[in-house]
Image (cartoon, rainbow, N blue to C red):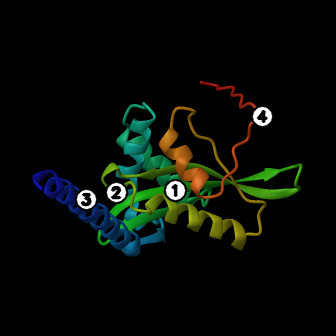
């Protein structure tokens, strides 16, 4: 009987844990709003941008990062959306307009996507991607394009779940001036 009680307790605990986690995730997803970035929230965006760059092993450069983002916003060279949960900024996506000659159309390069570690698995990344897809539809472009590290399995999983198709036919090459 004691073995049955232990098993029953375990399954009750497992059930409660799963559904409480699900409830927290559903609640957070419902409270996440996506807004366009503006100069008014540059400081909050810059904090997230710095964390994103650190994730990619870049040295923090607080002033350089702020200047970069300020230029993108004021010159309208990119579209940046922020994810907000209640009064806290928790993530962002930055998209750059590019062209695709083979489709004779515009395309959006989803260049940066970041969600603060404490808010991952809340649906924030999906909400940011959905907003990016909405932008692509509204601007009548061919779609979205992105790259991610081969080792970033978490990001790959997010992109797979959001209907991105991995390109196995092309290599990416770079030439850097500095």
Foreground residue, 73 or 143?
143
Name the residue beneath numbered marker 1. 93
Name the residue beneath numbered marker 3. 11
Residue at (17% x, 59% y) in the render: 9
- Describe the element under mark 4 as helix, strand or loop: loop
82 on left or right of 146: left
Foreground residue, 126 or 116?
126
Where is residue 24 drawn, in percent x and y?
Answer: 30, 67
- Describe the element under mark 1 as helix, strand or loop: strand
Checking the image for residue 119, the label placed there is: 2
12 on left or right of 164: left
Where is residue 177 drawn, in percent x and y?
Answer: 64, 25
Name the residue beneath numbered marker 4. 170
Front position among marks 4 and 1: 4
Disc 3 vs disc 4: Cβ atoms closer than 8 Å? no
The Cα–Cα distance between marks 3 and 1, rounded to whole angstroms, is: 40 Å
The Cα–Cα distance between marks 3 and 4, rounded to whole angstroms, is: 48 Å
Q: Which numbered disc, 1 or 2, marks the residue that appears first in the sequence?
A: 1
Disc 4 vs disc 1: Cβ atoms closer than 8 Å? no
Q: Which numbered disc, 4 or 2, marks the residue that appears first in the sequence?
A: 2
Spot the residue most to the front. 1
Q: Which numbered disc, 4 or 1, marks the residue that appears first in the sequence?
A: 1
Q: Quadrant of the N terminus?
A: bottom left
Front position among marks 2 and 3: 3
The Cα–Cα distance between marks 4 and 2, rounded to whole angstroms, is: 33 Å
The Cα–Cα distance between marks 2 and 3, rounded to whole angstroms, is: 27 Å
Q: Which numbered disc, 3 or 1, marks the residue that appears first in the sequence?
A: 3
Where is residue 101 drawn, in percent x and y?
Answer: 87, 49
Disc 3 vs disc 1: Cβ atoms closer than 8 Å? no
Where is residue 40 drawn, in percent x and y?
Answer: 39, 67
């Amino acid at each position: 009987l004691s073995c049955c009680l232990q098993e029953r307790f375990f399954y009750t605990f497992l059930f409660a844990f799963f559904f409480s986690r699900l409830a927290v995730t559903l609640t957070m997803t419902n409270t996440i709003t996506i807004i366009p970035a503006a100069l008014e929230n540059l400081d909050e965006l810059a904090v997230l941008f710095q964390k994103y760059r650190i994730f990619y092993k870049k040295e923090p450069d607080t002033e350089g990062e702020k200047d970069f983002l300020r230029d993108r916003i004021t010159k309208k060279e990119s579209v940046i959306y922020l994810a907000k949960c209640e009064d806290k900024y928790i993530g962002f996506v930055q998209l750059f307009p590019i062209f695709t000659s083979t489709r004779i159309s515009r395309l959006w390069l989803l260049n940066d996507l970041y969600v603060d570690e404490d808010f991952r698995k809340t649906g924030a990344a999906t909400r940011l991607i959905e907003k990016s897809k909405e932008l692509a539809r509204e601007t009548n472009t061919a779609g979205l394009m992105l790259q991610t590290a081969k080792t970033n399995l978490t990001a790959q999983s997010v992109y797979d779940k959001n209907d991105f198709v991995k390109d196995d036919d092309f290599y990416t090459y770079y030439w850097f001036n500095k």
